[in-house]
Amino acid sequence: MEKLIFYICTYAVISFTVDAKLGSSTEHYNTCLTENNVSDDDMLTEQDVIHDRHKESENQEKIKKNGCVLQCILEKFGMMEGSEYDIEKMRSETIKGDIDESTKLKLLEGLNNCINETKDLTEKCEKSFDLVVCGLKSKKKVYASRSENQEEHEHKSEK
């Protein structure tokens, strides 16, 4: 299940560990760092983007580097070519694994929203970065909502 960023997206690739670097859980991470002449230290953490800390730095060069690495990873997984998405590939990867139907639908809805928010961007690194940020935030909401629903259901069952 953890193959790409979102799985990526884009959704399942990223586990929500505090210091995980964007894309670092993928098999293509080091290759894409090298191909883009980016160091691991230049990469933002998942928590940085989920909590919008990347906006505080106003370091556009760092954000661009992150986006180019993410675009490279997406390309290597066949989810992008240049600045174009392979939407069907993204959708099929998003719902891979042992996920209940309700969660699959929510993940696909989030992916579709992220695709729609970023589809008109033409610069591939910016587009990839924005897609991944949107996807991470969407995935977090889906799983946070799922946890709340499970806790509520368990609480009602105890009564």
Image (cartoon, grey):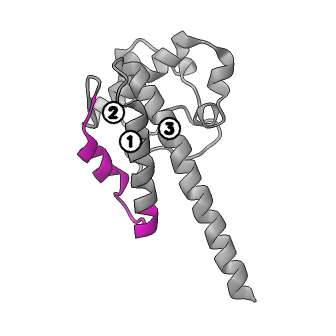
Residue 103: in magenta span = yes
Residue 129: in magenta span = no
Quarter of the figure with the N terminus = bottom left
Going from N to C along the chain, the mark reached first, 2 or 3, is 2
Q: Amino acid at mark 2?
A: Leu
Mark 3 secondary-structure assignment: helix
Task: Looking at the picture, tell me which residue is in the foreground, 71 or 84.
Answer: 84
Mark nearer the viewer, 1 or 3: 3
User: Which region is colored magenta?
Assistant: 84-104
Q: Residue at x 56, y 57 (%)?
A: 143
Mark 1 secondary-structure assignment: loop
Gap between marks 1 and 2 measured at Cα: 7 Å
Q: Is residue 12 left or right of residue 123?
A: right
Q: Residues within 10 Å of mark 3 (few under 14, many from 20)?
A: many
Q: Residues within 10 Å of mark 2 (few under 14, many from 20)?
A: many
- Is disc 1 in contact with disc 2, using a CB cutoff of under 8 Å? yes
User: At which x and y percent is residue 150?
Assistant: 62, 72
Residue at label 2? 74
Q: Residue at x 68, y 71 (%)?
A: 151
Q: Is residue 109 above or below residue 23?
A: below
Mark nearer the viewer, 2 or 3: 3
Q: Is residue 139 visible?
A: yes
Going from N to C along the chain, the mark reached first, 1 or 3, is 1
Res 158 quadrant in image: bottom right
Residue at label 1? 4
Q: Is residue 50 left or right of residue 74?
A: right
Q: Residue at x 33, y 19 (%)?
A: 122
Q: Amino acid at mark 3?
A: Cys
Q: Is residue 58 above or below residue 15?
A: above
